[in-house]
Image (spheres, helix red, strand yellow):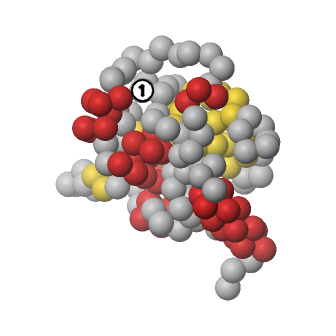
Amino acid sequence: MIDRRQLAIGGLTTLLTAVGLSRISTANNKTAKTFEITKTEQEWRTQLSPEQFRVLREHGTEWAHTSPLDKIYDPGTFHCAGCDLAVFSSETKFDSRTGWPSFWKPLDNAVGTSVDDTLFMTRTEIHCRRCGGHLGHVFPDGPEPTGLRYCMNGIAMTFVSKDKDDKKTG
């Protein structure tokens, strides 16, 4: 059964995607940042799938409920799909019922933030601190102990299991 929050989020996502506003221009970043890993647009396009490029490099948003990472709760770590930096632990993952992988805390020294004032609102964008890839946004409606919800795009990450084979998915 779909609750009001899921319906509202799904409707907003559909509307924004339909009018092309799900892509947030990198020009909206007011300050240019230097990252450890820098590549040309063509190098990123060669490395990433078209959808990963749209999300990680053009600040897009994947469709809700489309990422298999949303349902993964096995022990392991979630890595940036752009540079393979570990950014979240499965120990801080929770089911936010939004359709995107959600966490209450990133790993230490894994992410950076910037102000995203697009879409007629101000939000805090979360990006990989090493390559600058757009991962998602953070909201103040998460569980304890932080009260934060790091709402991430699954396409922007991969999952590395802690099992014997150290399987990587995503």
- The quadrant holding residue 79 is top left
**Which residue is label 1 attached to?**
131
Looking at the image, residue 56 sits to the left or right of residue 94; the answer is: left
Mark 1 crowd level (few <14, some 14–19, many ≥20, 10 Å Cα)? many
* Residue depicted at 55% across the width and 30% down the height: 26
In front of the other: 34 or 89? 34
Question: Quick check: 18 left or right of 34?
Answer: right
Name the residue rendered at 48%, 14% in the picture.
34
Q: Is residue 123 depicted above or below 50 in this figure?
A: above
Task: Pick out the residue farthest to the bottom.
Answer: 1
**In screen coordinates, is 82 left or right of 146?**
left
Name the amino acid type tagged 1: Cys
| Residue, far left | 165
Q: Position of residue 123 (x, y in %)?
A: 73, 39
Q: In which quarter of the image is the C terminus?
A: bottom left
Q: Residue at x 67, y 62 (%)?
A: 15
